[in-house]
Amino acid sequence: MRRAGLRTRVAAGFAAGALALSTSIALASYQFTRSSLLAERERTAVRAAYFDATIVQAGLTGERPDIIEVLRSLDTGGDRRAVLRRDGIWYARNVDAGVTTGIPERMQRLVAAGTPAVQRIRADGQPAVVVGVPLSPTTAYYEVDSLQELEETLRTVALVLTAVAVTTAVAGAGIGWHMTRYVLRPLRRVGDAAEEITAGDLSARLDPATEPDLARLTTSFNHMVDQLSRRLERDRRFAADVSHELRSPLQTLSAAASVLHRRREHLDDRTRTATDLVTDEIARFQTLVNDLIELARSDQPAERTPVAVGDLARQVCRGRGLPETLVRVTGPGTWLVDRRRVEQLLGNLLDNAVRHGGGPCAVRLTAQDGTYRVEVDDEGPGVDPQDRTVVFDRFVRGRGAHARGGGDGTGLGLALVAQHAAAHGGRAYVVDRPGGGARFRVDLREPRC
């Protein structure tokens, strides 16, 4: 399972924190609001019940009072319902629609004992508060006040607080996303500088004044690049010096071998064989020295110019006696690349296919989505999966190289391909060709504007 990116995780953390905080505040606000409203409503219900109880008690004077008429004289509105229990009999101003059955037995006993009581109940499935007021040892007045309107108000408050909590979480995620963009900007600069260095621009540095809080990282990065630049320059100079020093004796050996080769018909068989062997090895040695010199130059930045890659690829094929029909171009045919590097890159891939892959069968050049892609297919047995990670290293040849062709390579051809790809901000790798064989693929990145 792929792990979410740092920016996503930070934004999710901000959202979770904002949601937790807003939910806690919303719950506390809801509980406080609910308690306050219920307490105020109960106080109002008690005041109204005592006021009405006073009226009822005054109306019950006399020998045979009209209890129903007394109850109907009360101004209870539409939310309050009044009932009276006298000598064990319930009296109500209207038909008793479950009001008396909703009054708890315990509360009835408490009021009958002369103690006023208040309790929240559900009458007819609706929330209500009932107030019991004892009027005499045989008479108790009850008033049931509906809380339906209050419950709807609390439901609305809960919905509003929930919406506020969700909105706060979304806002927290947005703030986190924006803040991570700002926080990660210095790291993005480090990444851009690293890419430039990988592409061969060893002059890329970070400005310590841009982000004072990251001054230590910036200084350490620049120091590391300075050390790397000095080491690469030292290694490059050593390779170049050695290669140039080898050129002079090699030229002398090559000239002497050329004289022997021209006179090989006058030599005996053993001497002729030795002459051919010396001539071939000197030629291979010269190729090796040239490749070493090229490797010493390969760390330099790519010098990009507009190049008609189709014409260049066909020219490289002609120079090796291969048919131009191998070349297929898809997309724009003009690339902004280093012509010398791309020419050598194509030549090395074709030489590798001829030497180790049974010959090339296709050369594809594609430009799409900011990437230039070079693909060379061969008809050999392919590259062993264990070799694919190291075949582009210097002086490394796959285990199948000797089985697929001659062993006259220098082991530097594919290393140069990888170096030229890196100089263009890309990479080189090998995959299986559908139908058999190997497909060497090089991706070159278009220059940033």
Image: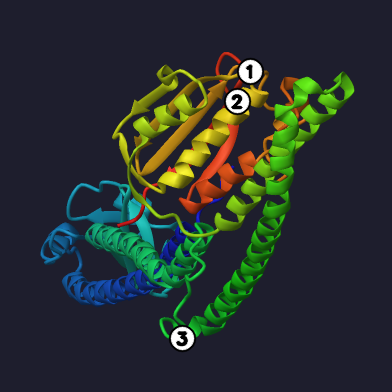
Above or below residue 279? Residue 328 is above
Decide if residue 393 is in sight here: no
Asked if the residue at tag 2 contacts the one at tag 1, i.e. Cβ–Cβ closer than 8 Å, the answer is yes
What amino acid is found at the position of numbered circle 2 in the picture?
Ala
First in sequence: mark 2 vs mark 3: 3
Disc 1 crowd rating (10 Å Cα; few below 14, some 14-19, many 20+) is some
202 or 164: nearer the viewer: 202
Marks 1 and 3, Cα distance to the nearest angstrom? 58 Å
384 or 5: nearer the viewer: 384
What amino acid is found at the position of numbered circle 1 in the picture?
Gly
Check the image and name the residue furthest to the front: 266
First in sequence: mark 1 vs mark 2: 2
Marks 1 and 2, Cα distance to the nearest angstrom? 6 Å
434 or 187: nearer the viewer: 434
Residue 32, by quadrant, is bottom left
Residue depicted at x 59% and y 32%:
430
Q: Could you say which disc has been placed on residue 413 in the image?
A: none
Image coordinates for residue 316, horizontal then vertical, percent:
46, 31
What amino acid is found at the position of numbered circle 3 in the picture?
Pro
Residue depicted at x 30% and y 62%:
167
Q: Secondary structure at mark 3?
A: helix
Q: Could you say which disc has been placed on residue 212 in the image?
A: 3
- Identify the residue position indicated by label 2 in the image: 353
Number of labelled discs?
A: 3
- Identify the residue position indicated by label 1 in the image: 358
Q: Is residue 85 left or right of residue 113?
A: left
Above or below residue 53? Residue 412 is above
Residue depicted at x 17% and y 62%:
71
Q: Secondary structure at mark 2?
A: helix
Check the image and name the residue furthest to the top: 435
Marks 2 and 3, Cα distance to the nearest angstrom? 53 Å
